[in-house]
Amino acid sequence: MLTAEYFDGRSARARVVTLSLVGGVLAIRGDGISLSFVARDVEWPERMRHGPRIARLPDGGSLQCRDVQAWDAWALSSGRGESWVVRAQQSWRWALASVLGLSVLLGAMYVWGVPWLARVAVAATPLSVDEAIGESALQSLDQQWLQPSKLPADQQQRLRAAFGRATAALPPGSVPTHRVEFRSGPLGPNAFALPGGTMVMTDALVELVQGDEAVLVGVLGHELGHVQQRHGLRLLFQAGAIAAVASVVLGDFSTLLAGAPVLLGQASYSRDAEREADAHAVTVLKAAGLSPAVMVTFFEKVAAHGRSERQGGAADSKTDRDHEGPARSGLGIAIASHPADEERIRFFREAAAR
């Protein structure tokens, strides 16, 4: 027997009752009260460190007991054992193990789960979505960061033609739809690919390599690799995997369109994506009869430019740096913002040797 308070669910009046639990039946007895309920129909409270025990009855009423130790002892003696979940919640060892397990699960989802989910979402998304996002992103970038190119029109055309000849040598059907745009502005030497096939190259990058067509074909070949693998859309999906999958299902890409310029401007591709794009650059260069070694020259020039920028920036005031906008940070997905590390240089040297 256990003393508790009974509430009928219709008034706030508490009435003292005694409880017994025999043969799977809960009996409630008190002044003018005689109720019985099948035990499995009652919502029994879990054992907790603080707060009264509250059991909810099928008819809308409830039982409350502030003597939690007496309730727990009564429940146990009446045959109401605890589940392993309740026992785990009361154990600091189980709590610690759960936190560690959750951390491992979240880490695995971030490293493997989200990229896999993004690939699935990209595969289910029509190419028209890439084009819509790319156009929206380019318009936003033109309004905020980019300016019309100052390169002579004939030079722009020569570079487009050189890249066109290189891609024409690739197997039929292997070249995704694309177009090359030139822009000036505070981004410095940069080239980047937007979803849908728009590839932007800055005047500063053309000037950095003295207009070397072979080098610029390699850079554009790298960006074409991003287009072919749809890395831009994958990047967006990975940044908001759950929201992106919902957009694919519901057909509402308004949120992605609004956030695309920010994500494309600040995020960076994974090293695996860069390796895929570098491999595509080698394919384009070799198809055009050019040596992948030109990319070694490119990375060396980028590295030299970066050192020069850092040395020059050391003397700048904080105010000057704060007003440079994206000139120093650059676009995260732009090839010139990636470190010209030994691994990538070695890759192009080995490709040239083969």
Image: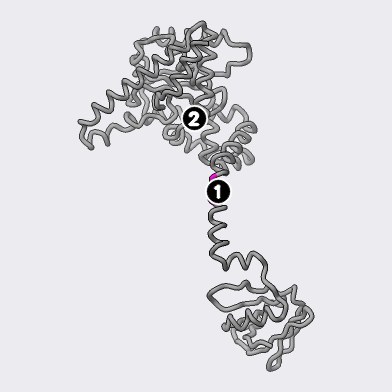
Residue 30 image offset from top left, x and y in percent: 69, 91
Report the residue at 41% width, 11% height from top. Answer: 156
As drawn, which residue projects farthest toward the bottom? 31
In-image side of 177 versus 293 (left or right) = right
Give the amino acid type for the residue marked by disc 1 in the picture: Val
Task: Locate residue 333 relative to residue 25 in the image: left or right.
Answer: left
Q: Position of residue 172 (x, y in %)?
A: 63, 11
- Identify the residue at horizontal 45%, vertical 19% (top origin): 346
Q: Main secondary structure of the magenta part?
A: helix
Classify 165 as above or below 73.
Answer: above
Residue 41 image offset from top left, x and y in percent: 74, 73
* Relative height, residue 143 to residue 179 (above, below): below
Task: Confirm or deny contact between disc 1 and disc 2 (CB under 8 A).
Answer: no
Location of the N terminus (image quadrant):
bottom right
Q: Residue furthest front?
A: 93
Q: Is residue 199 magenta?
A: no
Name the kind of residue labelled 2 in the image: Arg
Q: Is residue 141 left or right of residue 283?
A: left
Instruction: Report the label total.
Output: 2
Residue found at the very far top of the displayed protein: 289
Q: Which residues are magenta?
A: 103-107
Residue on which the image places disc 2: 271
Residue 283 sits in quarter: top right
User: Which residue has dot 1 on it?
Assistant: 104
Residue 115 figure quarter: top right
Q: Tell me the crowding category of disc 1: few under 14, some 14 to 19, or many 20 or more residues within 10 angstroms, Cα based.
A: few
Describe the element under mark 1 as helix, strand or loop: helix
